[in-house]
Amino acid sequence: MKKDAVALVILTFAVAVLGGWLGVRLGQRELTSNLGLDQVLHHDLSLTKGQERRIEELEASFSVKRKSLESEMRAANRELAQAMVTEHRMSPAVEQAIGHFHVAMRQLQELTTAHVLSMREELTPPQAAIFDRSVVRALDADGP
């Protein structure tokens, strides 16, 4: 009984460390990509006051929705951790938690893509060309 409790604590700790490590790695990549787009959008494109205002409105709306989906992903990770330490196998509960995470992750990717495209709609053709190059660099962060 005591061995089972120790094993459960060790497994829980390992899952938490893995989840934290993955979150940091993904977060660092997203932060780097977002900073690049933000730099281009707010500093390199010489936006008009009207463009700035409309893009700030888009960003405020996106931020609220993004935070909600990120919260949903964290909840799915908690479900996964609990299912893993309870089931100790690829059970339906583990698969359901993974599915929950994937649904939220897909929704976040779709929301982010729509947000980037909606900001692009506010740009002039020359600004959009610069923005497009920045988007390609952000999405191909491991590339040249």
Image (tube, rainbow, N blue to C red):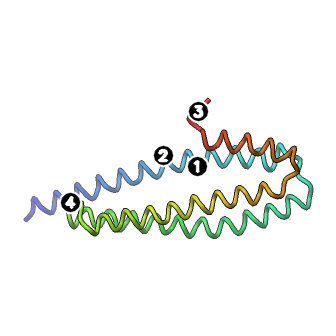
Three-letter amino acid code at the position of disc 2:
Arg
Distance between mark 2 and mark 4 Cα atoms:
26 Å
Q: Give the numbered dot on residue 30.
A: 1
Report which residue position mark 3 lands on. Answer: 143
Q: Could you say which quadrant of the image residue 19 lies in?
A: bottom left
Label 1 vs 4, first from the N-terminus: 1
Horizontal side, residue 117 vs residue 95: left or right:
right
Q: Residues within 10 Å of mark 4 (few under 14, many from 20)?
A: few
Where residue 116 appears, x then y in whole percent?
Answer: 70, 56
Residue 117 drawn above or below residue 1: above
Locate the C terminus by quadrant: top right
Where residue 54 appears, x then y in whole percent?
Answer: 83, 64
Q: At 58% across and 66% down in the image, what residue appears?
A: 67
Q: Residues within 10 Å of mark 2 (few under 14, many from 20)?
A: few
Horizontal side, residue 118 vs residue 96: left or right:
right
Report which residue position mark 4 lands on. Answer: 89
**Pair 3/2: label in front:** 3
Distance between mark 1 and mark 4 Cα atoms:
31 Å
Q: Could you say which quadrant of the image residue 66 lies in?
A: bottom right
Locate the N terminus by quadrant: bottom left
Q: Give the numbered dot on residue 129.
A: none
Label 2 vs 1, first from the N-terminus: 2
Report which residue position mark 2 lands on. Answer: 25
Distance between mark 3 and mark 2 Cα atoms:
17 Å
